[in-house]
Amino acid sequence: MKWGESKIMNCAEFQKVLPYIFETGGNTDELEHLKTCPICSDLVQDLRYIADQAKLLLPLRDPSPQVWDNIQNSLEREGLVKPQAARAQSAGKKKIASRE
Ligand SMILES: [Zn+2]
C-alpha cells in the first residue's frame, strides 16, 4: 500500500462484513466507516437492538455460573430480589450452607 492511499470502505463492503464486525468489534477501517456513515451506523444500531431482543427471547446456552452470579448481583443491587442471606437470617438462625 502506498502512502496517502487509504482504503475507503463503502457501504456494500461494510455490510458484507457486518456479522464479522459484530463478533470482533470491528477493525479501524470498519469503525472509521461506521463513524462517518449515518446509514451504516443506523443499521448497526438497529441490528444491535434486534440482537438484544433476540437474546432475551432465546434461552441462554450453557450460561456459566459467573453469568448467573452477575445477574443475581445486579438484581439484588436494583432491589428487584432480596439477597439470599437476608432471607435466611429473617427465617431464623440457620447457617447458610449453600446458595441453593
Ligand atoms: Zn455506510
Image (cartoon, grey):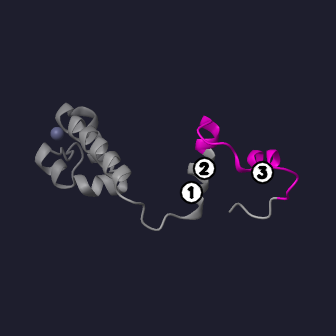
The percent position of residue 13, horizontal first and vertical second, equals 14, 51
**Is residue 78 inside the magenta stretch?**
yes
Tell me: 47 left or right of 69.
Answer: left
Alpha carbons under labels 1 and 2: distance apart: 6 Å
In this rendering, would 66 be left or right of 57?
Answer: right
Tell me the crowding category of disc 1: few under 14, some 14 to 19, or many 20 or more residues within 10 angstroms, Cα based.
Answer: few
How far apart in space, not on screen, are marks 1 and 3 (Cα)? 20 Å
Q: Amino acid at mark 1?
A: Trp
Mark 2 or 3, nearer chain start: 2
Range of residues picked out in magenta = 74-95
Which residue lies under the disc numbered 2? 72
Helix, strand or loop at mark 3: helix
User: Callout 2 environment at 10 Å: few (<14), some (14 to 19), or many (20+)?
Assistant: some
| Residue 83 part of the magenta segment | yes
Q: Disc 1 marks which residue?
A: 68
Residues at marks 1 and 2 touching, judged by CB atoms closer than 8 Å: yes
Measured Cα–Cα span from mark 2 to mark 3:
16 Å
Pointer 3 residue = 88
